[in-house]
Amino acid sequence: MKMEELKSGYTAELEVLGQEGSRWVLEGDDDDIMMNVSDAEEIQDGDTVKVFLYANRRGELAATLRLPNMTFGP
């Protein structure tokens, strides 16, 4: 199943692939998306989580469970 293109400023439902050190790895389009463990300590491998996508300090797409009141699109 093809998912919508993942972009900064939008929400998405992504599968948790695992944990690497202090970050969760989420399934992305071409690259995996990282989320800090401190943002989501109660999740497990294989869970599907609704996240807000943003560009981190390095310009990479990152995720957080802290959903804003406003986003782009529907």
Image (cartoon, rainbow, N blue to C red):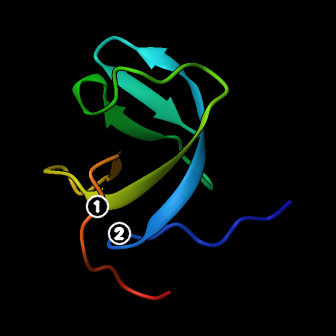
Give the side of residue 32 with respect to residue 64, left or right. right
Q: Identify the residue under disc 1.
A: 54
Q: Position of residue 26 (x, y in %)?
A: 52, 38
Q: Distance of mark 2 from mark 1, alpha carbons? A: 4 Å
- 40 and 28: which is toward the camera: 40
Q: Identify the residue under disc 2.
A: 8
Q: Residue at x 32, y 73 (%)?
A: 9
Q: Position of residue 61 (x, y in %)?
A: 36, 55
Q: Position of residue 5 (x, y in %)?
A: 59, 72
Vertical arrangement, residue 23 with respect to residue 34, above or below = above
Mark 2: few/some/many CA within 10 Å (<14, 14-19, 20+): some
Give the side of residue 18 with respect to residue 69, left or right. right
Q: Residue at x 23, y 57 (%)?
A: 59
Farthest residue toward the bottom? 73
Vertical arrangement, residue 46 with respect to residue 22, above or below = below
Vertical arrangement, residue 33 with respect to residue 52, above or below = above
Q: Amino acid at mark 1?
A: Tyr
Q: Position of residue 53 (x, y in %)?
A: 36, 60
